[in-house]
Image (cartoon, grey):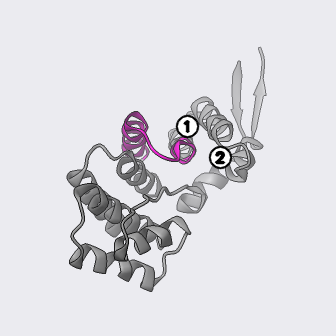
Amino acid sequence: MKWVLLAASAVLGMGLAGSAKAAMTVIGGGMAEDCSKAAVRGRSDRDSIQMCNIALQTEMLDPKDRAGTYINRGVMQMRQRLFDAARSDFDTAISIDPKLGEGWVNRGAVYIALKRYQDGLADINKGLDLGVVEPEKAYYNRALAYEGMDDAKSAYLDYQQAVTLKPNWLLPQQQLLRFTVTHR
């Protein structure tokens, strides 16, 4: 099979706008849970980030919830294109609980936004190996990394995997429309 990529520069030019970010669910009440809910709902406003800050400064969180709160704040910062701050939060989350795949996948998304595709690919692969709640987002971001590295076949296969895992998700479906597959 021959793989032909159409309009790759359109997606790569979008940078983070096309990437998917995975938040962590933190349960137990308090500001950490509110931070989690805000991240899951797609918020990234000042008040939402402040909830995360307060939770990290004042609440007694077990290591998993503390790491999850750093991930959630990092996701919000990534949405605001504050990549250094987001990467710092993902680094902290990984140092607290290196077995949380979401920390690795989200740090990989930051690297992709910074056009550090090989670093992004390595982190996303590590996150997928550890397991994540929304693997379709990891496959989507990994596809972006493959596109950045001019590997159209792998990108196509990962967009397909994202659609297989979440059939109603339009973002990877739209990306697949750019590809043409021909048989030799």
The residue beneath circle 1 is 150
The residue beneath circle 2 is 8
- Principal SS element in the magenta part? helix
Identify whether 70 is placed above or below 121.
Answer: below
Q: How many marks?
A: 2
Find out whether the residues at labels 1 and 2 contact each other: C-beta distance under 8 Å.
yes
For the point 62% across and 31% down, the residue is 157
Identify whether 32 is placed above or below 4.
Answer: below
For the point 65% across and 46% down, the residue is 8
User: Image quarter for residue 2?
Assistant: top right
Q: Is residue 83 visible?
A: no
Q: Residue furthest bottom?
A: 47
User: Image quarter for residue 96?
Assistant: bottom left
Q: Nearer the viewer, residue 136 or 171?
A: 136
Q: Position of residue 5 (x, y in %)?
A: 69, 37
Assign a secondary structure to mark 1: loop
Magenta run includes residue 25: no
Magenta run includes residue 131: yes
For the point 68% across and 40% down, the residue is 163
What type is the residue that disc 1 sits on? Asp
User: Image quarter for residue 46?
Assistant: bottom left
What type is the residue that disc 2 sits on? Ala
Q: Position of residue 148 (x, y in %)?
A: 52, 44
Assign a secondary structure to mark 2: helix
Magenta-highlighted residues: 117-140
Dot label at residue 112: none
How many residues crowd around disc 1 within 10 Å: few (fewer than 14), some, or many (20 or more)?
Answer: few
The C terminus appears in which quarter of the rendering?
top right
Q: Earlier in the sequence, mark 1 or mark 2?
A: 2
- Spatial CA distance of label 1 from label 2 is 9 Å
For the point 48% across and 55% down, the residue is 22
Q: Residue furthest top?
A: 184
